[in-house]
Amino acid sequence: MFERHIACVVAGLAAAAFVSTSVLVPPARADEKYPARAVEFIVPWGPGGGADQLARLVGKLAEPMLGQGLPVVNVAGGTGATGMAKLLAAPADGYAMAIYIADSHALLAGNNPRWQLADVAPVAVMLQGPSFIFVPESSPYKTWADFEKAAKEKPGTLKVATLGFGSVDDFSLKSLDAKGVKVVQVPFAKPSERYVSILGGHADALYEQAGDVASFITSKQMRPLMIFGKTRHPSFKDTPTSHELGYNVALPQFRSIVVRAGTPTDKISTLSTTLAKIAATPEYKAFLAEQFADPDSFIDASKAGAYLDAQLVEMKALAASK
């Protein structure tokens, strides 16, 4: 009898929890004004990185415009795959969206990706900018020529901190490898650990975007040796580009926002319009400047899909050439 009583109590508590959850998060009605409750904002990376910074700024600026909060949920792991799995497990109702960056996109160019581009609906591209190879200020490699020479003369001895295998970092370094610049990748899942890795001697160089390590650049703790791109950056006029050095790889780092495919178009339009307003604010423009990003980074939902398609074509071509 006692065991039966306990079983009944447990069943009752489970039922109560289900009812409570249903009351707290009711299913969306077709006629309700969107958004009628908070929109979960998934960041497939740890706190403190560029994707996290973007999400928190967008969330802060969007809340008064949408009339609802955008709580940030960090879900790190698998070069963004874990966070993407959380997004794709959520209903396609506009109440979950995620930061989607070039490194996660690059996974689609590999073998057996866990999702396809058709599984998501782009809402907007928020940031575009180049990546660099950085070294600590005290590094014996004063120029890219110094670094390149060491990597060729002693293959596999220089270590480069990256976000992870299968990422844009990985693709770019493999392109260097094909030209004889053979380095060892050291993946760091936590952005903060990756940034300081070269300062603590855990790596010789860092593959990163300038905005993410801006404080280290301004405090003269690290400096760039090369920028991945075709043209030099106005803030780093003395830093040569990959193309002028003979490395024809220039995958830009982008940070976009996506929802699950199948989300109603009117909800995507509401989010995209809100993000366009955010991109036009002085605060967001200042953020792009601090990130050393393209001031014309923003692309709305009507064109973001074509942008992601073009990026994937280039990534697949680069992957196939290895």
Image: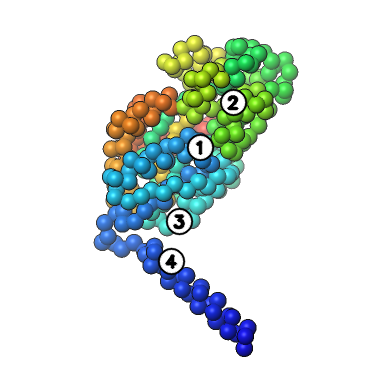
Q: Which mark is residue 90?
A: 3
Percent x, y of residue 38:
36, 53
Task: Give SS at disc 4.
Answer: helix
Q: Are marks 1 and 4 in contact (CB under 8 Å)?
A: no
Which circle, 3 or 4, is nearer the viewer? 4
Which circle, 3 or 1, is nearer the viewer? 1
* Mark 2 surroundings within 10 Å by alpha-carbon count, few (fewer than 14), some (14 through 19), many (20 or more): many
Q: Is residue 90 left or right of residue 268?
A: right
Task: Give SS at disc 3.
Answer: loop
Between residues 20 and 39, which one lies in front from this camera angle?
20
Q: Are marks 3 and 4 in contact (CB under 8 Å)?
A: no
Picture residue at 62% right of the left edge, 24% below the top: 199
Q: From this view, report whether residue 186 is shown above or below residue 66.
A: above
**First along the sequence among labels 3 and 1:** 1
Between residues 10 and 168, which one lies in front from this camera angle?
10
* Observer able to see residue 160: no
Q: From this view, report whether residue 92 is shown above or below residue 308.
A: below
Picture residue at 58% right of the left edge, 80% below the top: 7
Between residues 227 and 206, which one lies in front from this camera angle?
206
Q: CA distance from mark 3 to mark 4?
A: 15 Å
Label 4 sits on what residue type? Thr
Q: CA distance from mark 4 to mark 2?
A: 45 Å
Q: Is residue 198 left or right of residue 280?
A: right
Q: Quadrant of the C terminus?
A: top right
Q: Is residue 189 left or right of residue 291?
A: right
Q: Which residue is mark 2?
A: 206
Q: Are marks 3 and 2 in contact (CB under 8 Å)?
A: no
Q: CA distance from mark 3 to mark 1?
A: 25 Å
Q: Quadrant of the N terminus?
A: bottom right
Q: Are marks 2 and 1 in contact (CB under 8 Å)?
A: no
Which circle, 2 or 1, is nearer the viewer? 1
Q: Which mark is residue 48?
A: 1
